[in-house]
Image (cartoon, grey):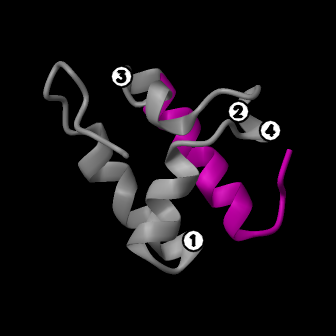
Amino acid sequence: MVEQNSDGSPQLAAVLPKAIQVFGSDEAARAWLDRPAIGLNQQRPIDLLSTPEGSAMVVVFLGRLEYGVYT
């Protein structure tokens, strides 16, 4: 299950609404965050949220998914 980052950073709170928008539900968005993503070099999106750079990668990838670009 998706948890807040260990450092208490707000990246999950910033990314989750976009993921919900893309995937259609909170449950689907949280499931996606926990699975390796092809377009993120098989990294789990939740793991990338520990840094600002990783969070930016996740947001950009969500935008690509929204428009059907999966890799």
Assess whether mark 2 and mark 4 are in contact (beta carbons under 8 angstroms): yes
41 drawn magenta: no
Residue at image point 37% right, 46% down = 1
Pointers 3 and 1 in contact (C-beta within 8 Å): no
Residue type of the residue flagged with mark 4: Ile
In this rendering, position of residue 21 left or right of residue 17:
right
| Residue pictured at 86% horizontal, 44% vertical | 71
Q: Earlier in the sequence, mark 1 or mark 2?
A: 1
Q: What stretch is highlighted in magenta?
A: 54-71
Label 2 is placed on what type of residue? Leu
Q: Counting other residues with Cα less than 10 Å from the Cα at mark 2, is it few (<14), some (14-19), or many (20 or more)?
A: some
Q: Earlier in the sequence, mark 3 or mark 4?
A: 4
Residue bearing the label numbered 1: 22
Q: Mark 2 — residue?
A: 40
The tag on residue 10 is: none
Q: In this view, does 31 lie to the left or right of 7?
A: right
Q: Position of residue 70 (x, y in %)?
A: 83, 53
> Can you give x and y, in whole percent of width and height, for residue 22 in the image?
57, 71
Q: Residue at x 29, y 38 (%)?
A: 11
Q: Distance between the residues labelled 3 and 1?
A: 21 Å
**Residue 9: percent from the left, percent from the top?**
19, 30
Mark 2 lies on a secondary structure that is helix
| Sequence-wise first label, 3 or 2 | 2
Q: Is residue 16 above or below residue 60?
A: below
Q: In which quarter of the image is residue 68?
A: bottom right
Q: Residue furthest bottom?
A: 24
Direction from residue 19 to residue 16 in the image, left or right:
left
Which circle marks residue 38 in the picture? 4
Q: What residue type is labelled 3?
A: Ser
Label 3 sits on residue: 50
